[in-house]
Image (spheres, rainbow, N blue to C red):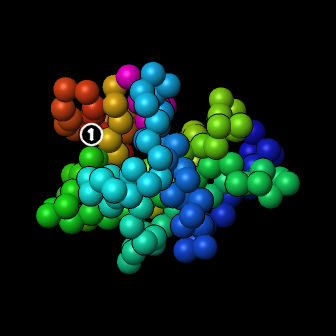
């Protein structure tokens, strides 16, 4: 699988691609009406995931096919206590967003992105990564298999943390 993709750090030049992937991440459930980028931008609780990227300390990993086509990404954002993300744990714990382009799903790329991002996070001195995932989302199993543990949640979603 690693011979199918190459990984590189996400840069500010990838902001539009990360916005596209954010739309994919919010639209994981096929039985729900899909949100558009404009709808996400118009909702303050969602728009924070599209804010200019990267802010100080934020980074990520982009996966590309060997032909150079973007295939997916995993990236970290910091949210303040006054405007927490869905997976908020603490101001010093970045929140993960991960998404894979539809044509590249089911090939193990999500697992590889999690591994690449965890390695980069260790190098950066990050102690923990958080996320929020709806329990019905098949990605919940991926996160658990990668070592993320449930630390809270609500009626539909879990907040998970990976300790590095």
Describe residue 138's horizontal placement relative to residue 48 as left or right.
right
Residue placed furthest toward the right: 67
Task: For residue 151, say whether it is visible.
Answer: yes
Q: Residue 46 colored magenta?
A: no
Task: For residue 141, say whether it is visible.
Answer: no
Residue placed furthest toward the bottom: 56
Q: Nearer the viewer, residue 83 or 149?
A: 83
Describe residue 90's horizontal placement relative to residue 43 as left or right.
left
- Identified at 44% across, 54% down, the residue is 38
Residue 143 lies, in percent from the top left, at 43, 35
Describe residue 111's horizontal placement relative to residue 128 as left or right.
right
Numbered label tally? 1
Q: Which residues are magenta?
A: 136-143
Residue 159 lies, in percent from the top left, at 27, 39
- Identified at 44% across, 42% down, the residue is 35
Q: Quadrant of the N terminus?
A: top right
- Identified at 60% across, 43% down, the residue is 100
Residue 45 lies, in percent from the top left, at 26, 53
**Residue annotated with mark 1:** 159
Q: Is residue 118 above or below residue 149?
A: below
Residue 49 lies, in percent from the top left, at 38, 58
- Identified at 38% across, 77% down, the residue is 56
Q: Is residue 104 above or below residue 129?
A: above
Secondary structure character of the magenta stretch overall: helix
Describe residue 33's horizontal placement relative to residue 154 as left or right.
right
Q: Residues within 10 Å of mark 1 (few under 14, many from 20)?
A: many
Q: Nearer the viewer, residue 102 or 32?
A: 32
């Amino acid at each position: 699988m690693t011979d199918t993709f190459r990984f590189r750090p996400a840069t500010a030049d990838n902001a539009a691609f990360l916005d596209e992937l954010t739309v994919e991440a919010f639209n994981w459930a096929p039985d729900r009406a899909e949100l558009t980028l404009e709808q996400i931008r118009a909702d303050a609780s969602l728009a924070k995931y599209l804010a200019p990227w990267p802010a100080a300390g934020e980074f990520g990993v982009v996966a590309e096919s060997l032909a150079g086509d973007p295939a997916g990404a995993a990236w970290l954002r910091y949210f303040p206590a006054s405007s927490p993300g869905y997976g908020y744990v603490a101001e010093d714990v970045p929140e993960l967003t991960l998404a894979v382009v539809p044509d590249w799903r089911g090939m193990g790329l999500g697992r590889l992105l999690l591994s690449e991002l965890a390695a980069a996070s260790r190098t950066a001195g990050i102690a923990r990564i958080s996320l929020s995932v709806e329990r019905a989302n098949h990605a919940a199993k991926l996160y658990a298999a990668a070592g993320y543990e449930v630390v809270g949640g609500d009626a539909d979603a879990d907040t998970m943390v990976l300790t590095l």
